[in-house]
Image (cartoon, rainbow, N blue to C red):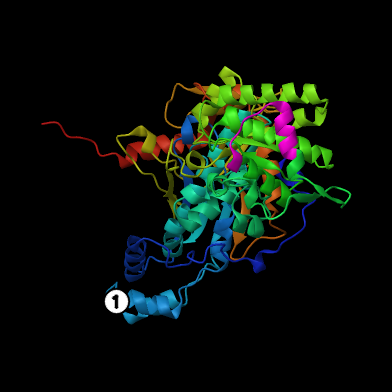
Amino acid sequence: MNTNQDSFSNCNPKFFHELKPTNHFVNALLTDLYQLTMAYCYWKQGRHEDQAVFDLFFRKCPFDGEFAASLEECVRFLATFQFTESDIQFLKNVIQAEEEFFDWLRNLDVSQVVVYGVVEGSVVFPLVPLLRVEGPLAVCQLLETTLLNLINYASLVATNAARFRLAVGEKSLLEFGLRRAQGADGGMSASRYTYLGGFDATSNVLASKLFAIPCSGTHAHSFVQTFSDCSQLITTKLLDSNRNEREFVQLVLETREKLGYSTNQGELAAFISYAQCFPDKFLVLVDTYDTLGSGVPNFICVALCLLEFGYKPLGIRLDSGDLSYLSKAARKEISRISRLTGKSELNQVKIAASNDLNEATLLSLQQQGHEIDIFGIGTHLVTCQQQPALGCVYKLVEINRQPRIKVSEDISKLTIPCSKNAYRLYGKEGYPLVDLLTLETEEAPKVGDKILCRHPYVERKRCLIVPTRIEPLLKMIWNGKPVEPCLYPLSQLREFCKQEMSCLREDHRRFLNPTPYKVSVSQTLFDFIHRLWLEETPIPELI
């Protein structure tokens, strides 16, 4: 697999100076109050210019899987970070502070901040920083909430989408989540990042426009319910593919009679109407009344006539019932009529399915067997019901070049101190074996060297690796200003995400009891962790 740089070598530059946040809510005031109260305390104590390093990372993989994505929206936020005069006037009513503090806020910028991050769409594992933020203490503190807000949901829903992709293989995936998303901004983010995570299209028209995502959709049950019979059709004719107007409705009715179907008249009229409007995009919802008794037969009748007119019908959508059984029964009937009429093209139509699908349902369908070609997924995708939050945290790891550690009785909440670099070490079979964290001041590991990899906390857990390839994970994305040359189209990030997923070993990607991926530290960093751990833990005095 190519490195991150190789994967993006042919992109068209979109320079950072053109950037602004996609969501107008994203600005300096989108923060928690305690960030501002801490900033005031730092300023009051004359510590606001102390040089700090923060890591943004997560402790546990989402959905018990082993990957997540990082995002570029944080760069858009940094590019426009500023407290407006309106913000300052509002804050004067919230925080009791000297006028000089508000003058400091008024002139605040991120020109002294440096940010390193993983390439968007990268596979990332627990404890590995998605972002490393360096700069003046108070400024870095004020960035925390917004960066977490931007990264947490976007990474979570991209990861959820990637897991749906793994569950269905090469089948088509459509995102239908806008109506179930948490607000308009949640719906837009979901459409954007589920596409990055591997979905093929969205029903969200605005997201399609803004992010160049393919748009997909047909009709709802209400469309079918508005028709009672064919007398409601404004015309009985249809232009064929050669642009000749011909009688269409009568041909459909004659076809139904020849095939011996007795179906719902209103549904048939609705299908005819849809075919007259979209003859080359004919995919209809077949479960309004009776899927096998009416919906599928009505589709077959209209589809056969479209073939006579030189069009290629697309298929049907199932939105209720036993999707395994119904898809197989529908395919069986479509195949039967295809053979009966000699219309082989009929058997090429697709079967789409929706109806509150989740990861478990998709895996169950795989076990049962089905004839579904396209999955439309909404609620469980965009709301991430299996795990509603990623749990990214933003922790201080260094102040004025002094390492800092957070100690906890829960060892999983112990932080890894110091400004760090991160490397992915690959084995001879081409798969990544371990992510290695080192001190920023350490020499980078080398291909062919025998490298000792230590568990961050457990002394006895260690291994030796001789890597055949080493990939640095953290790239500078901000150095007082955006680091060029370019950002990348969403479609290109999507392909990169796909490559990243395929690079993982199968046992890391499986749904049941995935093999934990190793995140290790160098011997030098291991020593720092355990020395600070002891220094910062009070010694109990027994009486």
Which residue, given by chain and number where applicable, does mark 1 sit on? 93
Coordinates of residue 265 in the picture (x, y in percent): 60, 40
On screen, 180 above or below 90? above
Q: Give percent across and percent down for residue 136.
A: 46, 63
Residue extending furthest left?
Answer: 543
Q: Position of residue 131 (x, y in %)?
A: 53, 50
Q: Is residue 53 visible?
A: no
Asked if residue 168 lies in the magenta stretch, the reply is no
In this orientation, which residue lies closer to the viewer: 319 or 111?
319
| 217 relative to 33, above or below | above
**Along the viewing direction, whichever of 184 and 240 lies nearer the viewer:** 240
Q: Which residue is drawn at 70% across and 64% down?
A: 15
Residue 257 colored in magenta in the image: yes
Is residue 477 shown left or right of residue 417?
Answer: right
Q: What residue type is labelled 1?
A: Asn
In this view of the protein, which residue sits in the foreground, 345 or 61? Answer: 345
Q: In which quarter of the image is residue 162?
A: top right
Q: Position of residue 334 (x, y in %)?
A: 71, 26
Q: Provide the major secondary structure of the magenta segment.
A: helix
What segment carries the magenta color? Answer: 252-266
Q: In which quarter of the image is the N terminus?
A: top right
Does residue 453 show up?
yes
Q: Quadrant of residue 105?
A: bottom left
For the point 42% across and 60% down, the residue is 141
Could you say which quadrant of the image residue 452 lies in?
Answer: top right
Q: In which quarter of the image is the C terminus?
A: top left
In this image, 352 relative to 358: left or right? right
- Residue at (80, 47) in percent of width and height: 247
